[in-house]
Amino acid sequence: MNDVRAKPSTEVQASALRREALEKKLSTRRYGRSMEVHETVDSTMDLAQEACRRGAADGHIVWADAQRSGRGTRGRAWLSPPGEDLYLSLVARPGLTLAELPPITLAAGLAVADAIATIGDYETDAVRIKWPNDVWIARKKCAGILVESSSVGESPEAVIIGIGINVNRRFIDEEIAASATSMSLSSAGMRRFDRVALLASLLDRLESWIDVLATRGTSTIAGALEPRLALLGEPARVDTRDGVVRGVDAQGALLFETQYGLEHLQAGRLEPLVDPS
Ligand code: BTN
């Protein structure tokens, strides 16, 4: 699916090599079996949206080595330098209705956490999911998930799941250094990780957790998520409210205990209130 016409041959070769390497490691039935591999793009989200409109299959991925305008949640930018990290967008057609789709972010979070824990070999419990869409290693953000619905009014709905993982980067911008990390920076001896192996593991876990969501429902995802939740039992802030994180309910809403009682939050930006370290 790569458009090779206008690209320098070195770029084409690099993409072709990465595609070949991934194909060799794939263990999935559907995810990643259709793929576009690029060197530099504006955002993999835009290309996945286009692929979706063209009728891309469930599990189609757009994988780039770098992004010029990677985007995160709440209109923030996602820095995407070349050669170090993982940037991909997945077209998922899980056969869920629009109302059933939001917990897919949590299923993707479980998949990202599984893949990072498997490849990274961190201490037990170091890899955690910060509800609803971040993955932390040792209390610092290492990965983010951005879910966008497809603009075509289809039923069942398609979604685009964008995932960025800081894999091998050694430098983090000063202003976010206290709260962000990479797999390499968090590893003993600052190891370099094989991005292809990580992506193959990630696709395997995504296919598996999204199938769990589709067949067994949100409560199974919520049950798997709760023990791996960051900030569980700790004081925290969600937007402007202070409270304590108590878990997630069967619908995947955050259970947040405030002065008004136990609230079930559907959305919001969760942050630690104090750093106990
Ligand atoms: C967040 O934590 O704010 C979500 C970040 C999502 C970043 C990924 S990188 C691949 C895909 N393409 C984008 O432009 N964004 C997502």
Image (spheres, rainbow, N blue to C red):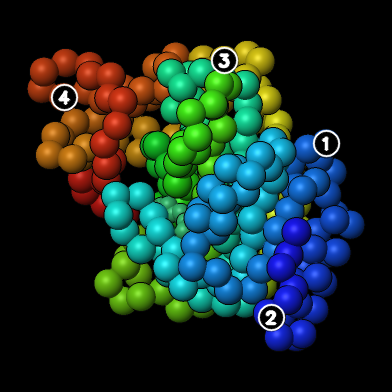
From the viewer's side, name the closer residue of 52 and 236: 52
159 relative position to 132: left or right: right
Sequence-wise first label, 2 or 4: 2
Q: Position of residue 67 (x, y in %)?
A: 51, 69
The answer to whether residue 195 is above or below residue 204 is: below
Q: Amino acid at mark 2?
A: Lys
Is disc 2 placed on a helix, strand or loop? loop
The residue to which callout 2 is attached is: 7
Q: Is mark 4 within 8 Å of ligand 1?
A: no
Q: Amino acid at mark 3?
A: Gly
Q: Are marks 1 and 2 in contact (CB under 8 Å)?
A: no
Of marks 1 and 2, the one in the foreground: 2
Q: Position of residue 82 (x, y in %)?
A: 57, 77
Which residue lies at the image location 32% right of the left edge and 67% below the top edge? 176
Mark yes or no: residue 260 visible.
yes
Between the C-alphas of marks 2 and 3, the distance is: 44 Å
From the viewer's side, name the closer residue of 117 and 34: 34
The residue to which callout 4 is attached is: 258
